[in-house]
């Protein structure tokens, strides 16, 4: 009987010890499982972020991802094109203004030939020379922006072609429309610059003719003044 009671006591002690041990291990096991889930989730999200920026998208095919990327490229190239178009239009506008200012100065000078003192004539010429330098600077600026604009047009055309081949038809149509609008705007502003250049060329021709007439009139005046002196000498 004593041995039986000792056996029952040992069994009860073993059960209570086992319950305590498992009770102390359970939180650790739960915490380990929690961190395992967090780690797996982090790896999955990290991998997704590498493939698709900014958000997690599941079950996307390569074709759909390429179409999305092509649409982003067309948007960027269209933005580049619009900025370069605006810069070129502003540059050509300022060039045209500078040319018209030069034309006005030259015509005013031609109209006042023979009426200015040497000091006034020198002052006018200094202004004209400065305006010619301004025109040259504006012309160089136009050439620089036009070179960038041509590159933007080519880039936009390439992006439109890439969008078409990848299946992003709407992005392709949008890019081509932007190209046509930009080319139309630049063509209009080029006409204004061409008209200003033509007027400047006409003014230069007028200047040559007017200067030739003015020089001839001075020579005739000198000849007329010398005739009486020669006649008097013969007497």
Image (cartoon, grey):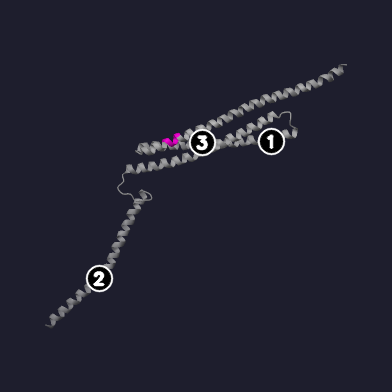
N-terminal-most mark, 2 or 1 = 2
What residue would you read off at disc 2? 23
Look at 41% across and 41% down and name the residue there.
73
Mark 1 or 3, nearer chain start? 1
Give the prevailing secondary structure in the magenta stretch: helix
Give the distance between the C-alpha atoms of the residues marked 2 and 3, in whole angstroms.
77 Å
> Percent x, y for residue 186?
50, 34
Q: Is residue 220 above or below residue 14?
A: above
> Where the C terminus falls, by quadrant?
top right
Residue neighbourhood size for the residue with mark 1, other residues' Cα within 10 Å, grouped as few (<14), some (14–19), many (≥20): few
Magenta residues?
176-180
Q: Is residue 31 left or right of residue 118?
A: left
State the residue position of label 1.
Answer: 126
State the residue at coordinates (81%, 19%): 227
Left or right: 127 as drawn, with respect to 95: right
The answer to which quarter of the image holds residue 140 is: top right
The residue most toward the bottom is 2
Of residues 36 and 173, the one drawn nearer to the viewer in this rendering:
173
Q: CA distance from mark 2 to mark 1?
A: 100 Å
Q: In terms of image quadrants, where is residue 177?
A: top left
Q: Position of residue 173 (x, y in %)?
A: 39, 36
Task: Kindly report which numbered mark, 2 or 1, lies closer to the viewer in this rendering.
Answer: 1
Label whose residue precedes the other's in the sequence (2 or 3): 2
């Amino acid at each position: 009987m004593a041995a039986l009671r000792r056996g029952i006591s040992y069994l009860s002690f073993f059960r209570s010890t086992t319950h305590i041990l498992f009770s102390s291990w359970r939180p650790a096991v739960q915490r380990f499982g929690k961190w395992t889930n967090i780690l797996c989730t982090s790896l999955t999200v990290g991998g997704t972020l590498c493939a698709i920026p900014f958000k997690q998208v599941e079950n996307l095919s390569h074709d759909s991802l390429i179409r999305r990327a092509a649409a982003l490229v067309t948007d960027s190239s269209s933005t580049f094109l619009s900025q370069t178009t605006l810069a070129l239009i502003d540059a050509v506008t300022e060039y045209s203004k500078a040319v018209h200012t030069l034309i006005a100065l030259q015509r005013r000078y031609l109209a006042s030939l023979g009426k200015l003192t040497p000091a006034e004539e020198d002052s006018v010429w200094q202004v004209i020379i400065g305006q010619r330098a301004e025109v040259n600077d504006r012309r160089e600026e136009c050439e620089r922006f036009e070179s960038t604009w041509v590159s933007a047009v080519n880039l936009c055309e390439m992006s439109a072609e890439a969008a078409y081949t990848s299946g992003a038809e709407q992005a392709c149509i949008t890019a081509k429309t932007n190209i046509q609008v930009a080319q139309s705007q630049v063509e209009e502003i080029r006409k204004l610059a061409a008209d200003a250049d033509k007027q400047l060329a006409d003014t230069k021709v007028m200047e040559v003719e007017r200067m030739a007439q003015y020089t001839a009139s001075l020579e005739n005046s000198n000849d007329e003044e010398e005739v009486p002196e020669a006649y008097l000498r013969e007497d």
